Amino acid sequence: MNKILLFLLITFTAFSQEKTFTTQDIEVNSLIKGTLFSPKNTNKKTKLVILIAGSGPTNRSGNQFGVLTNSLKYLSEGLVENNIAVFSYDKRLFAQMKSGKIDEKLDRFDDMIIDATSVLDYFKSQKKFKKIIIAGHSEGSLVGMITALKKADGFISLAGAGRPIDEVLKEQLVKQLPNLDAEISGYLTKLREGSTFELTSKNPTIKSIFRESVQPYMISWIKYNPTIEIKKLKIPVMIINGTKDLQVPESEAMLLKAAYPKAELKIIENMNHNLKEILIDKDNLKSYNDGTIPITPILTETMTKFINSI
């Protein structure tokens, strides 16, 4: 009798843990590879979310070399469990670094827009999904809102800035290095004007941020203003931020909302930049290297409700 009960318990547990979705690796082109998360009951009414990662060499799971969050992996799984398909892909910079074939001087912000547009075109051409929504995280928010103009059905900004990157950088750097305010302002002015320059600073932070090989990328990024780009959209928009975000404060979300008043705005209590729930402040930085911490469930619920309304 006990053996029968044990067998039934094991069988029930196995069924209860069975995944409600499938995953498929897809190569959109030679530069873009990702994973499609599909509900097992995918049909003509299924909607697709294209996730665009934030700054740096970020992969489809939301991780970088030396940074482990699994934030986009958890978000993908959370949405697909709510019958929403998701495609999350490795940024070309991640693929280049992984292969060792990278020349930083040639990278441009517009490359990310080209890649995201390629992904959107790929899935639109398949005509498999009823609606396609673009969701961009951090730097990916700006990429996403520009890409969404290419006939996406909805857009979600996740911890996206509301100001041009030069303004954001100046504020962040001057807080760290108040004595270098004039130097920082001078470098940003040159980049805003489209000029590269020889970097003579001895400060390690300045040398890292303004290194000569990355200046062309920054020039291409600075020319875009999120509050101008979001105004161009004629589709449903949701703006999401968290109260524990150390990189992009709530005020940035307010700027986007002011620029696009029709957008839905959701400020999630205790959510940080990695989309994790932070109840103790010391855990905020820890979340950047602990891939076991789940994302806050309120995020999945909020996004699901918005997507279902489109």
Image (cartoon, grey):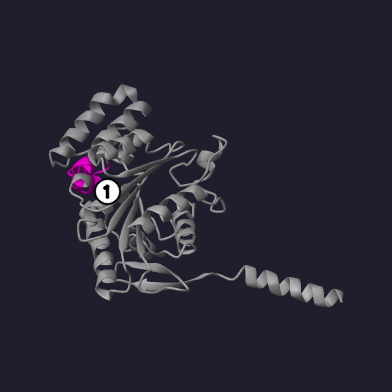
Closer-to-camera residue (111/217): 111
Image x and y of residue 87, in percent:
38, 65
Which residue is rendered at x = 41% and y = 68% of the image? Answer: 35
Closer-to-camera residue (204/11): 11
Number of marks present in the image shown? 1
Image x and y of residue 22, in percent:
48, 72
Q: Is residue 206 visible?
A: yes
151 in relation to 224, above or below: below
Residue placed furthest toward the right: 1
Image x and y of residue 153, in percent:
27, 59
Span shown in magenta:
211-229
244 in relation to 88, above or below: above
Quarter of the figure that contains the N terminus: bottom right
The secondary structure that dominates the magenta segment is helix
Left or right, 87 with reference to 127: right
Q: Secondary structure at mark 1?
A: helix
143 in relation to 280, above or below: below
Q: Is residue 224 magenta?
A: yes
Residue of label 1: 142
Q: Amino acid at mark 1?
A: Leu
115 in relation to 277, above or below: below
Image x and y of residue 198, in percent:
20, 39
